[in-house]
Image (cartoon, rainbow, N blue to C red):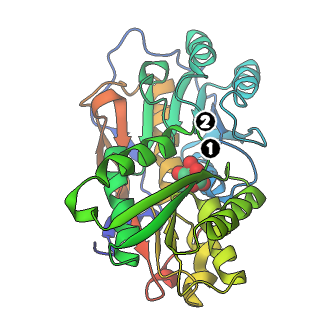
Amino acid sequence: MNTRRTLFALAFLVLAGCKPDTPATSPSAPATPAGGEKVKLSFIPKNTGNPYFDGIAKGLTDTCAEIGCEVSVTGPSTAEPTSQISFIKDEVQRGAKVIVIAANSPDALNATLDEAKAAGVTVLTVDSDLTGNESHRDVGIFATDFSKMGEFLLDLIGKNINYEGKFAILSATTDAPNQKAWVASINELIKQPKYAKMQLVDTVFGDDKDQKSVTEAEGLLTKYPDLKGILAPTTVGVTAAAKVVESRKVFDKVKVTGLGTPDQMRRFVKDGIVPNFALWSPPDMGVVAAHVGVSLAKSELKATKGTKFSCGKLGEKEITDKNILIIGPPVIFTKENIDQYHFQ
Ligand code: RAM
């Protein structure tokens, strides 16, 4: 994969602005806020204290400063399936016109989101979708096509262990729709001949908590002394696993890779603790969510498949099947390129 993909680099340029190519005609579109009033967006991350979500919040905030909307960020301290429910209700009460949520569960939020939509609130998912329950939100904005992530991740760990030997997955929470989809897909793909010499020995969950992730990574090393790799497709997990192989001095023997942010992982890559890892641009999701949310709230955009959306330097985006909007591919960070990227 080309590690200098243009799309990803463009994430950090100021956007000229996103404009719908197809004007909305739907009479059932959400109510337009009173003339001149700023649209209120509320971002509910999976949980607080995870810098990854600060990136999405930054994209939202920067874009609102440009196009004139308001953003508030609020969320639960832990990422349980139902922990976002009270936050959704509170934000609707507080007058949010758009809820942007990284879902902790594919179905536990359905009824609450339906109530929000019935109250005229536009509901967008970012980062993690209501997989299988997409009708309970308007548009889902993701960095990458979930169906392709399994293969990407399996090849990422595969290349690091020469497609041979035992590896384990350190995931986030068991219910997280994005993590769940990727883990399920890895379990299917591993049956292919290409991965015949690789053995997925375990999948553990650090719940996107620093200490629990460290404990789970340590547990893997103890349980599987011949482990060759840890694949952590979570920014919290991959940082924790990197710390563990560093403190146990086994980074030559156990390769850690996965999805991480450049700011959190820079030191590990530069010091040779982690050979490489990957991610997309969290701020981009926020940028697009702000534009889509405001346009939907103002009935300027129609949330249907085929609607095209020109997003400044990010290029034209199209709402696809299940009202999904994909931003761009992940990039693989190495010692050589990491200093080109600066975000949490
Ligand atoms: C963690 C979260 C998030 C995921 C990233 C890669 O921060 O689990 O949902 O997309 O990692």
Check disc 1 and report the residue beneath it: 173
- Residue in the foreground of this view, choosing between 276 and 73: 276
Task: Identify residue type, mark 2.
Answer: Asn
Label 2 with label 1: CB-CB less than 8 Å? yes
Check residue 312 in the rendering and tell me which mark sits there, or answer none.
none
* Of the pair 15 and 138, the residue shown nearer to us: 138
Q: Residue at x 56, y 39 (%)?
A: 176
Of the two numbered discs 2 and 1 on the same chain, state the one appearing first in sequence: 2
One can see residue 180 in this view: yes
Would residue 87 appear left or right of 201 to someone viewing this image? Answer: right
Q: Nearer the viewer, residue 158 or 93?
A: 158
Q: Specify whether tag 1 is near ligand 1 (CB below 8 Å).
A: yes
Few, some or many residues within 10 Å of mark 2 (<14, 14–19, 20+): many
The residue identified by callout 2 is 104
- Residue that appears at 74% across and 39% down: 74
The number of numbered discs placed on residues in the rendered structure image is: 2
Q: In the image, is 236 to the left or to the right of 140?
A: right
Q: Is residue 148 above or below residue 256?
A: above
Picture quadrant where residue 196 is located: bottom left
The crowding category of the residue bearing disc 1, from other C-alpha atoms within 10 Å (few below 14, some 14 to 19, many at least 20), is: many
Residue 65 in sight in this render: no
At x 34%, y 75%, the residue is 159
Where, by quadrant of the figure, is residue 1 drawn?
bottom left
Query: Quadrant location of the C terminus?
Result: bottom right
SS under mark 2:
loop
Q: Is residue 40 above or below residue 172?
A: above
